[in-house]
């Protein structure tokens, strides 16, 4: 993998540790890397699933995750790194009431809602070829995009994560260029985000996936701004230490070029904005 680890940036708002079912990274590894690379603030956003057949269902408890992250926050504060207790909740409308109840009873610093692709999805590896055959593009992406829209409209989340993560699973049947040629398919998602005030996440993990571009692409980020979107956040979505801050500068650049002046973040009860002009590497050449 080409080294595209970013340096000297204020925030990586999407990180997974060994408290997620699909990561084995001890939290202190991120603290050490943040010191080395000058990433000032981290949101630890381990998975929480509510569908009983989902891989993250019941993997950890709230108390366990909070203790690990809060303790790490105390350890790394003296080194100049702020670690926030976040969560990435898989949005599944069938469990909306359970998700709402969980968030009412448990205090997180920052909450991402995301739609994932699991075994029963039409985008699963053994299903996707049959799913796309004979369908127009709008129908192909509808199950995923419609679920993202409902998540944005729910008002439960600070940000909706990787809004077109489905790109990863559609390659090679549907390429990112095909979606780029149909930007109108994103309009309901972007509109729901604007109306609800939910932040759009620029997720740079797409650059290390078959999609080869961020979730969503810079063009969609620019369209979100043009529609009146002002809440945006950026995360590497690292599940391994080697992916920490990977291509994060590309995400920051996408936000700045779209016209955003600040990131939107939450630190518990405090809704915060993080000035993008203070990030020295944002306007620099792309990270290589």
Image (cartoon, rainbow, N blue to C red):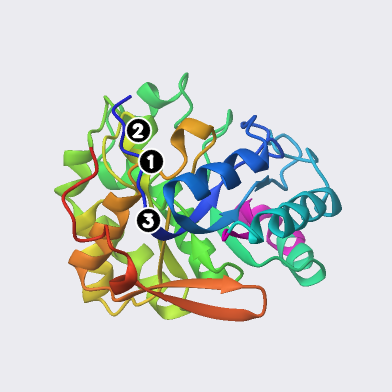
Q: Residue at x 31, y 28 (%)?
A: 210
Any magenta on residue 95? yes
Sort mark 3 into few (<14), some (14-19) or many (20+) by Cα contacts within 10 Å: some
Give the residue drawn at x 37%, y 56%: 8
Mark 2 highlights which residue? 208
The number of discs equals 3
Q: Nearer the viewer, mark 2 or mark 1?
A: 1
Q: Secondary structure at mark 2?
A: helix
Residue position for label 3 = 8
186 vs 270, left or right, is left
Q: Determine whether, in the image, residue 245 is placed left or right of residue 93.
A: left
SS under mark 3: loop
Note whether residue 221 is visible: yes
Magenta range is: 80-98
Which badge, 2 or 1, comes first in the chain's sequence? 2
In space, the residues marked 2 and 1 are separated at their CA atoms by: 9 Å
User: Looking at the image, which residue is at 57% across and 72% down?
Assistant: 266
Image: 239 above or below 265:
above
In the rendered image, the residue lying farthest to the top is: 126
Give the side of residue 191 with respect to residue 177, left or right: right
Q: Residue at x 29, y 34 (%)?
A: 211
Which residue is under mark 1? Answer: 246
Say whether residue 216 is visible: no
Residue extending farthest front: 78
Q: Are marks 1 and 3 in contact (CB under 8 Å)?
A: no
Quadrant where the C terminus lies? top left
Image quadrant containing the N terminus? top left
Q: Residues within 10 Å of mark 1 (few under 14, many from 20)?
A: many
The reply to whether callout 2 and callout 1 are in contact (CB within 8 Å) is: yes
- Which mark is first along the chain, 3 or 2? 3
Mark in front: 2 vs 3: 3
């Amino acid at each position: 993998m080409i080294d595209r680890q970013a340096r000297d940036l204020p925030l990586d708002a999407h990180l997974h540790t060994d408290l997620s079912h699909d990561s084995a990274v001890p939290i202190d590894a991120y603290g050490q890397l943040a010191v080395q690379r000058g990433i000032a603030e981290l949101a630890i956003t381990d998975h929480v699933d509510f569908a009983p057949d989902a891989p993250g269902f019941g993997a950890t408890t709230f108390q366990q995750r909070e203790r690990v992250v809060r303790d790490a926050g105390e350890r790394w504060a003296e080194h100049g790194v702020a670690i926030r207790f976040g969560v990435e909740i898989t949005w599944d409308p069938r469990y909306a009431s359970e998700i709402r109840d969980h968030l009412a009873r448990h205090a997180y610093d920052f909450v991402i809602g995301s739609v994932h692709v699991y075994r029963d999805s039409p985008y699963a590896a053994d299903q996707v070829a049959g799913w796309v055959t004979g369908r127009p593009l709008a129908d192909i992406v509808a199950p995923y995009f419609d679920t993202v829209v409902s998540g944005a409209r729910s008002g439960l989340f600070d940000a909706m994560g990787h809004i077109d993560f489905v790109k990863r699973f559609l390659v090679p049947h549907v390429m990112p260029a095909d979606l780029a040629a149909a930007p109108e398919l994103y309009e309901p998602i972007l509109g729901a985000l604007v109306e609800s005030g939910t932040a759009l996440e620029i997720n740079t993990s797409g650059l290390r996936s078959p999609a080869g571009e961020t979730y969503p692409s810079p063009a969609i980020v620019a369209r979100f701004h043009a529609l009146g979107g002002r809440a945006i956040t950026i995360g590497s979505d690292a599940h391994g230490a080697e992916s920490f801050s990977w291509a994060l500068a590309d995400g920051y650049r996408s936000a700045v070029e779209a016209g955003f002046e600040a990131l939107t973040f939450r630190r518990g009860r405090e809704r915060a904005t993080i000035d993008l002009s203070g990030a020295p590497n944002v306007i620099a050449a792309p990270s290589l």
